[in-house]
């Protein structure tokens, strides 16, 4: 998979593209339907498949003081898309210039950059004041040089346990997944994503407080303004031993008892004592154990950490 940062004459010279376009935050089952269709159309037409997205995400740019929680940062999106197999991941910088483009200008940019066919969701919007909707593309795309395909919503099982055949279906979207994660419903989130929810990053140096308390942790900076979930979790960690995951207990929050401010993912990996600094890890959230709390003193916090570790081991054993 190649990375493009702009659409211009150079990208057009590399060949034509069938592009799935959208925010692609989370790379959920709805996004995968777009990607699969783009790959099918590209193969049939002898073109390259592309996922076309934006950074920052438009809603982050438009609401800088109150951005939506990010399901995936750039690194996570890249890794997930590598598994889905588009030929190209094109990430356009979303800024005032892109926001101000008319629908026709936006489409001209796509065509000039080599895009021949565009696959989008029914609720896609782009351009000045969201003028470039799916309906607009259906009406005007062909005349501007684009073949357009709009996909219907993808739905998933509503209830968290999916226990009844008559359970209501809900539309799969990043907002629904954010809501499920915020509520601690990891089962529902996994059903909408098509995989368990996880975060990825490189282990950074911390203050080594956990080591002095008997709970050494691998600390991952989150590379996002806001997280979709918080608390204490039973987790599985990949990237330490090839071909297998290791169990652990993780804290996702600000560490209020020790005066923390920045959101951090701290993971204590069970029965492991090696050096993980600089290693890229994936932390899969298996069960939410409790809210993050402020304790009266460190001794009280450590006692709770032991209870959390026991609870996490039990959750992982039953997983």
Image (tube, grey):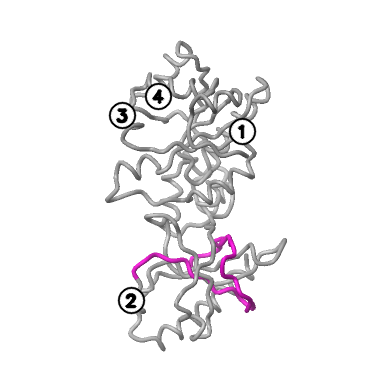
Residue behind mark 3: 100
Depth check, mark 1 against mark 4: the one in front is 4
Residue 36: mark: 1
Q: Are marks 2 and 3 in contact (CB under 8 Å)?
A: no
Q: Is residue 221 magenta?
A: no
- Range of residues picked out in magenta: 261-288
Q: Relative to 191, is 275 above or below?
A: below
Residue behind mark 4: 106
- Left or right: where 207 falls relative to 2: left
Q: Do the residues labelled 1 and 4 touch (CB within 8 Å)?
A: no
Mark 4, secondary structure of its residue: helix
Sequence-first disc among 1 and 4: 1
- Left or right: where 318 falls relative to 311: right
Q: Do the residues labelled 2 and 4 touch (CB within 8 Å)?
A: no
Q: Do the residues labelled 3 and 1 touch (CB within 8 Å)?
A: no
Sequence-first disc among 3 and 4: 3
Q: Relative to 214, is 51 above or below?
A: above
Given the current orientation, which residue lies at the most extreme right position?
Answer: 243
Marks 2 and 3, Cα distance to the nearest angstrom? 42 Å
Query: Is residue 220 or residue 152 the one in the foreground?
Result: 220
Marks 1 and 2, Cα distance to the nearest angstrom? 46 Å
Depth check, mark 3 against mark 1: the one in front is 3
Residue behind mark 2: 259
How many neighbours does mark 2 have within 10 angstroms: few (below 14), some (14-19), or many (20 or more)?
few
Mark 2, secondary structure of its residue: loop
Which residue occupies 58% across, 60% down?
282
Q: Quadrant of residue 132?
A: top left
Which residue occupies 53% across, 43% down?
28
Which residue occupies 46% across, 48% down?
177
């Amino acid at each position: 998979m190649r990375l493009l940062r702009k659409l211009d004459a150079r990208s057009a010279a590399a060949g034509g593209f069938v592009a799935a376009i959208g925010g692609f935050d989370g790379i959920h089952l709805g996004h995968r339907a777009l990607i699969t269709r783009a790959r099918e159309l590209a193969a049939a037409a002898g073109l390259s498949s592309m996922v076309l997205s934006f950074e920052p995400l438009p809603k982050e740019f438009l609401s800088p003081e109150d951005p939506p929680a990010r399901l995936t940062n750039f690194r996570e999106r890249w890794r997930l898309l590598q598994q889905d197999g588009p030929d190209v991941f094109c990430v356009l910088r979303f800024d005032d210039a892109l926001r101000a483009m008319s629908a026709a200008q936006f489409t001209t940019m796509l065509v000039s950059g080599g895009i021949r066919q565009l696959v989008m969701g029914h609720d896609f919007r782009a351009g000045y004041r969201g003028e470039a909707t799916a309906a607009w593309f259906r009406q005007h795309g062909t005349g501007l040089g684009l073949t357009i395909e709009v996909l219907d919503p993808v739905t998933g099982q509503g209830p968290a346990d999916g226990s009844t055949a008559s359970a209501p279906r809900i539309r799969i979207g990043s907002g629904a997944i954010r809501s499920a994660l915020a509520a601690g419903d990891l089962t529902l989130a996994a059903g909408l994503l098509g995989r368990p929810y996880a975060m990825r990053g490189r282990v950074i140096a911390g203050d080594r407080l956990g080591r002095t308390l008997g709970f050494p942790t691998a600390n991952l900076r989150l590379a996002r303004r806001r997280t979709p979930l918080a608390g204490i979790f039973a987790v599985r960690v990949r990237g330490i031993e090839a071909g297998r995951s290791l169990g652990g207990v993780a804290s996702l929050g600000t560490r209020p008892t020790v005066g923390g401010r920045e959101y951090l993912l701290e993971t204590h990996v069970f029965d492991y004592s090696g050096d993980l600094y600089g290693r890229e890890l994936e932390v899969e959230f298996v069960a939410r154990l409790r809210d993050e709390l402020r304790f009266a003193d460190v001794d009280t916090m450590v006692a709770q950490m032991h209870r959390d570790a026991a609870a996490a081991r039990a959750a992982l054993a039953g997983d």
